[in-house]
């Protein structure tokens, strides 16, 4: 059962570890805790501590995620297809903060019809902290032939067009 309150807040030692990992004091937006796991939303990354070991991933590298309140499970998929999850018995405000940070990394999104059929959703993302390069992703749909040189050239040209249009 999910609980809301301050019990999910990182403790002094956990904050010290995060500071050592990051090289500066972490700005915690929200946190959730489960058995053997602490998940912390920071401005620029999602930090996860499992069995005493920290890992972190920039928000722009999380393709999508969800919160299942019935199972108390936060799940996310990285842009490389790697899937992760954490059962959080003390979720606090983390589920909402998680979704907001992932959405905040999307700068532009446009559905495009491809030459030869099918379509792609072209997405430009950057860390919501405003740091780093824009990462472009093309999510295919229908009979999109992503291995065709003409399709690849089209996607690159449309990425460049959107970057110019939005000043990215």
Image (spheres, rainbow, N blue to C red):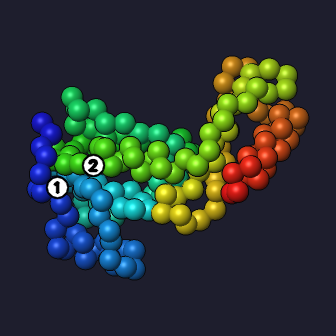
Gap between marks 2 and 1 measured at Cα: 9 Å
Residue 165 point in image, percent of width and height: 74, 49
Q: Quadrant of residue 11?
A: bottom left
* Drawn side of residue 39 relative to residue 60, left or right: left
Residue 47 point in image, percent of width and height: 35, 60
Q: Tell me whether circle 2 and circle 1 mark residues in contact (CB < 8 Å).
A: yes
Q: Is residue 112 above or below residue 2?
A: above
Residue 98 point in image, percent of width and height: 36, 48
* Drawn side of residue 92 relative to residue 39, left or right: left
Using the image as rendered, state which of residue 139 and residue 147 is in the foreground.
Answer: 139
Residue 43 point in image, percent of width and height: 40, 62
Q: Is residue 53 visible?
A: no
User: Disc 1 marks which residue?
Assistant: 8
* Drawn side of residue 103 relative to residue 110, left or right: left
Q: Residues within 10 Å of mark 2 (few under 14, many from 20)?
A: many
User: Is tag 2's residue or tag 1's residue first in the polypeptide sequence?
Assistant: 1
Disc 2, SS: helix
Q: Is residue 118 above or below residue 138?
A: above
User: Disc 2 marks which residue?
Assistant: 94
Identity of the residue drawn at 18% across and 60% down: 9
Q: Is residue 138 visible?
A: yes
| Farthest right residue in view | 150
Q: Residues within 10 Å of mark 1 (few under 14, many from 20)?
A: many
């Amino acid at each position: 059962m999910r609980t809301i309150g301050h019990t999910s807040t990182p403790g002094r030692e956990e904050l010290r570890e995060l500071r050592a990992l990051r090289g500066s004091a972490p700005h915690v937006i929200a946190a959730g805790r489960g058995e053997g796991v602490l998940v912390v939303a920071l401005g620029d990354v999602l930090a996860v501590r499992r069995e005493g070991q920290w890992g972190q991933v920039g928000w722009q590298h999380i393709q999508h995620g969800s919160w299942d309140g019935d199972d108390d499970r936060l799940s996310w998929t990285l842009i490389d297809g790697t899937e992760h999850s954490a059962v959080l018995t003390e979720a606090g405000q983390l589920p909402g903060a998680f979704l907001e940070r992932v959405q905040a990394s999307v700068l532009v999104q446009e559905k495009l019809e491809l030459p030869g059929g099918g379509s792609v959703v072209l997405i430009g993302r950057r860390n919501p902290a405003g740091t780093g390069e824009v990462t472009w992703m093309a999510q295919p749909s229908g009979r999109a032939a992503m291995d065709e040189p003409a399709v690849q050239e089209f996607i690159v040209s449309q990425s460049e067009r959107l970057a110019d249009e939005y000043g990215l």
